[in-house]
């Protein structure tokens, strides 16, 4: 039996991802996914969001369990702080998407990761959301991401890893580029 | 053979060596694209010596210079004469379809039947324009790099150049220097120094074997074929024209043009990563060159290795621009080119309109493709690259005519 003890294993099934890439190149319609979330008002600025079902590969899917997310605003906004601030959830989404990319690309490039930590900061002038100054945007004025990576790779390889992860990241694209949003109400 | 540019001519020479009768059908004159579809100041991005065509090459006294377009046309014209290429000029192919045991080629000057056919019309027939172009406010002048000839065509005032590969950077440089302030929207690009350690970057890539890398040896050929061409320019000064050089003369860098909404251009927040990826790619190429130089004992002979300063990106590049405010008068699309196969009535195109082929052997018996990015080698789309492809594919074509190969099987 082959010695696999030195094999790189970041817990990412790259072979399956590459197979999927090949299959979806030949069957582009199966690549159409739809992601969903439901959010229910609880009280004040507190809300509870759930994700459970999504569509892809031509059919409906369910997560193995229903995931829930409390969101609220902290005391400085005169709120009860029952959950993360929505803009923090955006940072969480960006961080976890980049992190998944780092692991997957590292696996493909045979870089063994020992530890990876990403630290994110989103700057915001709240004169925007408080409608004090219409020239100030509501959203972040910029996002800084810092990765600390302990791995068997040169600094250049780690820079390339993080760069590739940004290029392939869905949330990075969502945040960095405009998206049309359609809102309806009953 | 359809097209009498460098690819068609190289193939003609190789077929003639094998005594295979052929004709080249050319919609215009020899080297038509070079003659009629490029801007006035353009020089080839590869040096004069790097135009080794089968049975022909550069013999002048400026091997390190870069040909102007008239010089390029003249060079290929002379090649056509030297090899007595049977070119039918001003003959426009209107359709190609399969006919028993071969193809029927219809032109505006009559039909041709042939057992084999070579598509050598090149990779750059149509300027690519992104879908966001449709949302551009009226009142702005828009043109493509294919329509651009010189800055006199442009109104006075600002210009948004979209695309920062070799074309976009050269046009941004020329237009900004004409007194029209340029904003350059930067997507994926690959930076490279013109001269490295005293030698042309193309010399290094040629010597170190980078340009000879084969399509069946790279990790991901689909991705390799999509990589934009190196951000190079051919100038008398042999200067490096990268984003730092453009920033240095006052060109404003913004992210990829991501949308146009209500008369405002929206730029991606990805500029920093686009530049980081480009710097990383360049440094990997220079690492490869340095390793090769060390292994081949050149370290004492040429200048010491060095690295260019990282691409400078301001802290908060603008994410939008009001196109109706009057500062920008012209949008110039330098977003690449694509081939035109609208005349090809043989089902060999994939859903993206690209010809399905294996190293130039098209997925239709007796049909060949030439002159595309990384067709068989990294250099396939270069003047210097069509020769080796023509040698390989002419051998395959000869075997096919002899009935010695299975249609579609790739040459070794």
Image (cartoon, rainbow, N blue to C red):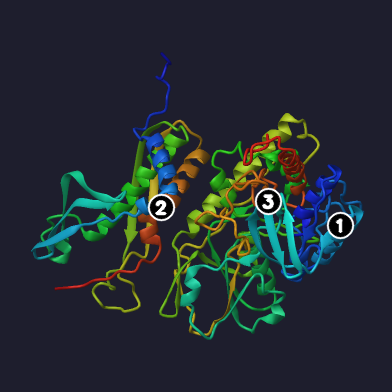
Instruction: Give the letter of the chain under mark 2.
Output: A
Instruction: Give the letter of the chain under mark 3.
Output: B
Q: Quadrant of the N terminus of chain B?
A: bottom right
Q: Earlier in the sequence, mark 3 or mark 1?
A: 1
The residue at which mark 1 appears reads as B80
Disc 3 from disc 1: Cα separation:
26 Å
Indicate the position of residue B194 as horizontal and vertical percent values. Answer: 72, 53
The residue at which mark 2 appears reads as A28
Task: Name the residue nearer the viewer: A40 or B351.
Answer: B351
Whether residue A83 sits left or right of residue A23 in the image: it is left
- Residue at image x 59%, y 49%? B225
Q: Is residue B166 above or below residue B382?
A: below
- Residue at image x 73%, y 68%? B92
Disc 3 from disc 2: Cα separation:
32 Å
Instruction: Give the letter of the chain under mark 1.
Output: B
Task: Name the residue nearer the viewer: B140 or B272.
Answer: B140
- Decide: few, some or many residues near mark 2? Use Cα within 10 Å; few <14, some 14-19, many ≥20: few
Indicate the position of residue A86 as horizontal and vertical percent values. Answer: 22, 60
- Determine if residue B238 is in view: yes
**Which label belongs to residue B102?**
3
């Amino acid at each position: 039996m082959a010695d696999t003890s030195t094999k790189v294993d970041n817990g990412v099934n790259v072979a399956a991802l590459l197979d999927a890439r090949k299959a979806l190149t030949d069957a582009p319609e199966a690549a159409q996914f739809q992601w969903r979330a439901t959010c229910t008002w609880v009280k004040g600025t507190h809300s509870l969001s759930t994700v459970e079902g999504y569509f892809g590969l031509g059919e409906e899917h369910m997560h193995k369990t229903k995931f829930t997310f409390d969101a609220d605003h902290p005391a400085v906004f005169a709120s009860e702080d029952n959950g993360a601030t929505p803009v923090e959830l955006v940072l969480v989404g960006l961080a976890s998407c980049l992190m998944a990319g780092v692991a997957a690309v590292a696996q493909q490039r045979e870089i063994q990761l020992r530890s990876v930590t990403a630290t994110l900061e989103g700057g915001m002038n709240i004169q925007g959301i408080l409608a004090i100054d219409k020239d100030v945007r509501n959203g972040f004025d910029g996002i800084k991401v810092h990765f600390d990576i302990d791995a068997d790779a040169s600094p250049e390889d780690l820079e390339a890893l993080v760069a590739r992860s940004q290029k392939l990241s869905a949330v990075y694209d969502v945040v960095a580029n405009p998206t049309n949003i359609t809102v309806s109400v009953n | 053979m359809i097209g009498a540019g460098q690819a068609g001519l190289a193939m003609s020479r190789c077929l003639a060596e094998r005594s295979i009768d052929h004709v080249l059908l050319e919609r215009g004159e020899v080297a038509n694209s070079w003659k009629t579809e490029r801007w006035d100041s353009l020089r080839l991005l590869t040096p004069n010596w790097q135009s080794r065509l089968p049975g022909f090459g550069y013999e002048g006294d400026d091997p390190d210079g870069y040909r102007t377009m008239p010089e390029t046309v003249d060079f290929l014209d002379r090649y056509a004469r030297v090899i007595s290429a049977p070119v039918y000029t001003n003959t426009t192919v209107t359709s190609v379809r399969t006919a028993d045991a071969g193809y029927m080629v219809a032109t505006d000057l009559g039909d041709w039947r042939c057992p084999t056919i070579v598509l050598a019309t090149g990779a750059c027939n149509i300027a690519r324009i992104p879908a966001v172009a449709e949302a551009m406010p009226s009142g702005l002048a828009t043109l493509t790099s294919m329509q651009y000839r010189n800055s006199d065509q442009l109104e006075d005032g600002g210009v948004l150049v979209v695309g920062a590969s070799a074309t976009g950077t050269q046009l941004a440089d020329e237009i900004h220097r004409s007194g029209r302030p340029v904003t350059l929207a930067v997507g994926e690009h690959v930076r490279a120094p013109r001269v490295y350690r005293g030698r042309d970057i193309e010399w290094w890539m040629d010597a170190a074997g980078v340009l000879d890398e084969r399509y069946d040896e790279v990790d991901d050929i689909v991705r390799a074929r999509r990589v934009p061409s190196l951000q190079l320019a051919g100038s008398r000064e042999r200067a490096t024209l990268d984003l730092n050089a453009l920033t240095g003369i006052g060109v404003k860098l913004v992210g990829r043009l991501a949308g146009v909404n209500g008369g405002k251009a929206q730029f991606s927040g990805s500029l920093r990563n686009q530049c980081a990826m480009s710097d990383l790619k360049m440094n990997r190429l220079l690492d490869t060159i340095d390793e090769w130089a060390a292994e081949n004992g050149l370290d004492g002979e040429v200048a010491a290795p060095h690295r260019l300063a990282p691409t400078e990106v301001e802290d908060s590049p603008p994410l939008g621009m009001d196109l109706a405010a009057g500062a920008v008068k012209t949008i110039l699309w330098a977003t690449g080119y694509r081939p035109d196969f609208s005349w090809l009535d043989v089902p060999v195109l994939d859903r993206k309109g690209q010809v399905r082929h294996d190293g130039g052997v098209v997925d239709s018996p007796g049909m060949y493709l030439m002159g595309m990015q990384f067709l068989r080698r990294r250099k396939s789309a270069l003047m210097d690259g069509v020769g080796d492809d023509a040698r390989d594919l002419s051998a395959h074509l000869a075997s096919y005519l002899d009935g010695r190969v299975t249609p579609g099987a790739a040459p070794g």
